[in-house]
């Protein structure tokens, strides 16, 4: 089974400070994050500043989520809303969120800074 098919089977856990993990419920995820859970899960340790670099799984998930978002204008709006709402709740670092596309070598059709800051 390909890694992307396994994403729906991953537990909804995000690594936070001190390398502890917290489980979040579907009700805690903004509705616009529907389908973006793999980005939050696999890239949480990087965006939360626990790991200095994203893992290959993070970059694979980020590529998939960003590509899906860029397919439609609404997809970009939903992803940006997801990151703006979920980022502070999950204690993601703005600098890490902004750098994720570059460090994963993802070419975006939109400004990540405008996406995060609104």
Image (cartoon, helix red, strand yellow):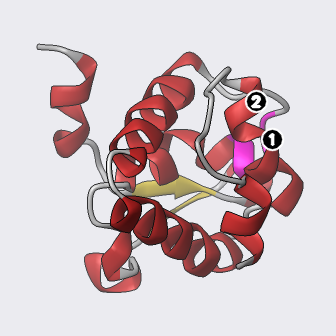
- Quarter of the image for residue 37 reads bottom left
Extreme residue in the left direction: 1
Left or right: 42, with 16 as reference point:
left
Residue drawn at 47 percent across, 42 percent down? 66
Q: Quadrant of residue 74?
A: bottom left
Q: Secondary structure at mark 1?
A: helix
Q: Is residue 54 above or below residue 99?
A: above
Q: Which residue does the numbered mark 2 point to in the structure image? A: 102
Q: Which residue occupies the foreground of this view, 8 or 79?
A: 79
Instruction: Examine the residues drawn in magenta and state their main secondary structure.
Output: loop
Q: Is residue 49 visible in the rendered structure shown here?
A: no
Q: Which residue is identified by label 1?
A: 99
- Position of the N terminus by quadrant: top left
| Image position, residue 46 (x, y; %) | 72, 41
For the residues bearing labels 1 and 2, Cβ distance under 8 angstroms: yes
x, y percent for residue 32: 35, 74
User: As drawn, is 14 to the left or to the right of 84?
Assistant: left
């Amino acid at each position: 089974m390909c890694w992307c098919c396994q994403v729906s089977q991953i537990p909804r856990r995000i690594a936070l400070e001190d390398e502890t993990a917290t489980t979040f419920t579907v009700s805690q995820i903004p509705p616009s994050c529907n389908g973006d859970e793999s980005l939050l899960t696999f890239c949480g340790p990087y965006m939360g500043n626990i790991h200095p670099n994203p893992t290959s799984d993070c970059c694979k998930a980020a590529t998939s989520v960003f590509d899906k978002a860029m397919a439609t204008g609404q997809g970009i709006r939903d992803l940006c809303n997801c990151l703006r709402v979920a980022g502070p709740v999950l204690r993601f670092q703005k600098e890490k969120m902004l750098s994720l596309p570059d460090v994963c070598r993802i070419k975006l059709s939109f400004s990540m800074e405008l996406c995060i800051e609104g």
